[in-house]
Image (cartoon, rainbow, N blue to C red):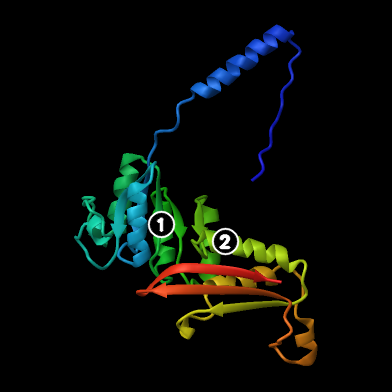
Amino acid sequence: MATLCHSIHTRASGKIARRNAAAKVFCSMQMPPSQSTIKVVIIGATKEIGRTAIAAVSKARGMELAGAIDSQCIGQDAGEISGMEEALEIPVLNDLTMVLGSIAQSRATGVVVDFSEPSTVYDNVKQAAAFGLSSVVYIPKIELDTVTELSAFCEKASMGCLVAPTLSIGSVLLQQAAIQASFHYNNVEIVESRPNPLDLPSQDAIQIANNISDLGQIYNREDMNSGNPVSVRKIFRIAIFLSIQNGHCQFVKFILIP
């Protein structure tokens, strides 16, 4: 991310200008860092990604777990279901309104992280916005119509909402690399390797395909002319390989193949 700097030149003498500059630097160095803590509410707390998020938030600097919402394991401690050594003294609840109301009364800065279901995400974001909290949504296979509705609602409510198609840094980097590489090739192929064929295509692959399709360039013209939607003559390929151990994804490898 580029940073734009704006320089200010004064007409004062060199000595006064140097003194003012030194004072500005001193004041900047003495500014204390913000001590506000972000209250985090996690919806879908008992899911694997929810339990991981609970542990991560509890260890993160500047963040504090303020609520764990789920219809499962109600009453159990959020730290215990996440496999943490110590309890967090925050029970799993199925009452989002009560948790949001508590944060609003404390006038703390808060955010809702939603791992729930496509059918409930819209109402969850509306409730969060009503209490002045922004939302981060990660729900695989969320419908585009739902995203459009969320965008319209948040714009009208002047509230922020991030709908993340993926939370993997590697996947984001792959998407950026795929976009850059696609400008230099006329043919594109997305290749995936997963233990369970029913999981194909993945959301990562779909997102990459959508990103490349939105660039306004027509690829694979040979296939279109021949009437064959699949061709073995591909020049630019994106390969996605996953390693699954004990039912959990341990390693993800992305390869750009020119």
Residue pictured at 65% horizontal, 69% vertical? 256
| Callout 1 amino acid | Val
Residue pictured at 36% horizontal, 75% vertical? 247
Residue position for label 2: 172
Q: CA distance from mark 2 to mark 1?
A: 19 Å
In which quadrant of the rendered view does residue 122 lie?
bottom left
Instruction: Report the front residue among 150 and 217.
Output: 217
Q: Left or right? Give the position of 118 relative to 236.
A: left
On screen, 58 above or below 125? Answer: above
**Tag 1 secondary structure:** strand
Q: Position of residue 210 (x, y in %)?
A: 63, 71
Residue pictured at 49% horizontal, 71% vertical? 142
On screen, 11 above or below 202? Answer: above
Q: Left or right? Give the position of 192 relative to 68.
A: right
| Callout 2 amino acid | Val
Q: Quadrant of the C terminus?
A: bottom right
Residue position for label 1: 113
Counting every numbered tag in the picture gives: 2
Foreground tag (2 vs 1): 2
